[in-house]
Image (cartoon, helix red, strand yellow):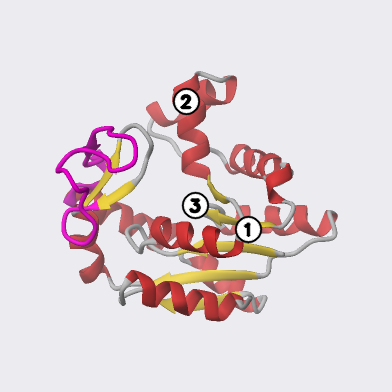
Amino acid sequence: MKRVVLLGPPGAGKGTQAEGISTKYNIPHISTGDIFRANVKEGTPLGVKISSIMEAGQLVPDELVCEVVADRVQKSDCANGYLLDGFPRTVAQAKFFDEYLAKNGQELDKVIDIEVDEAILLPRMVGRRVCRKCGKPYHVVSMPPKVEGVCDVCGGEVYQRADDTEETVKNRFAVYQAQTSPLTDYYRSSGKLAPIDGAGSVQDVLNAICAVLGE
């Protein structure tokens, strides 16, 4: 059983590492961003609500985010654990989830915090690309698709998201430091926090994470 939260600033490689962790421990990778985008795309009631909030330039309220995650981790594929990526984003969300777990006689195993300096993150993020169809991540330097602009998996268009431009990246990093980084203090006090140096290769970082999580 592995119940894991993955923290780290934008561009720290959470998505790539989540894929490796999910495969290694056979647990689902749960990204709130993916859940929200899927609901918006499918036009579900939740998607309509989220879309109107985001179009207004507002953050999705903690209560709604927590409700979505609590519902997701009750699915049958989470019976052996799960990896949360993009949640919690605030201390309020973290407290809610801890309370939810306690009510169900559960607790988190580890909170992995991938640490990377902003000077390293900026070029890493500006070079990011993603498949518009299946969401597979790429990078123009370290992990380009075999055919430029074409996804290796589904043949979809590989493009740069608007939130990966330099100006947006710098703003996202500032927002993360102000809002989300206090989570490290919260989880450190509970003894769950495991800082990981994210400046190395993808495999080195994954090895370090697996050493913390164990078999």
What is the number of the mark on residue 94? 1
Horizontal relation, residue 115 to residue 72: left or right:
left
Residue 57 occupies which quadrant of the picture?
Answer: top left
Q: Which residue is pictured at 52% across the width and 70% down the height?
A: 112
Is label 3 in contact with label 1 (beta carbons under 8 Å)? no
Q: Position of residue 73 (x, y in %)?
A: 69, 47
Q: Where does the magenta region start and end? A: 139-166
Q: Position of residue 147 (x, y in %)?
A: 16, 43
Mark nearest the camera among 3 and 1 is 3
Q: Indicate yes or no whether the magenta region holds residue 159.
A: yes
Q: Is residue 154 above or below residue 91?
A: above
Query: Within 10 Å of the Cα at label 2, are there few (<14), some (14-19), or many (20+) other Cα atoms?
Result: some
What is the number of the mark on residue 40? 2
Q: Residue tagged by mark 3?
A: 86
Pick the residue in front: 151 or 183: 151
Query: In the picture, which quadrant includes the N terminus?
Result: bottom right
Horizontal relation, residue 103 to residue 30: left or right:
right
Mark 3 is on which residue type? Answer: Gly
Query: In the picture, which quadrant includes the C terminus?
Result: bottom right
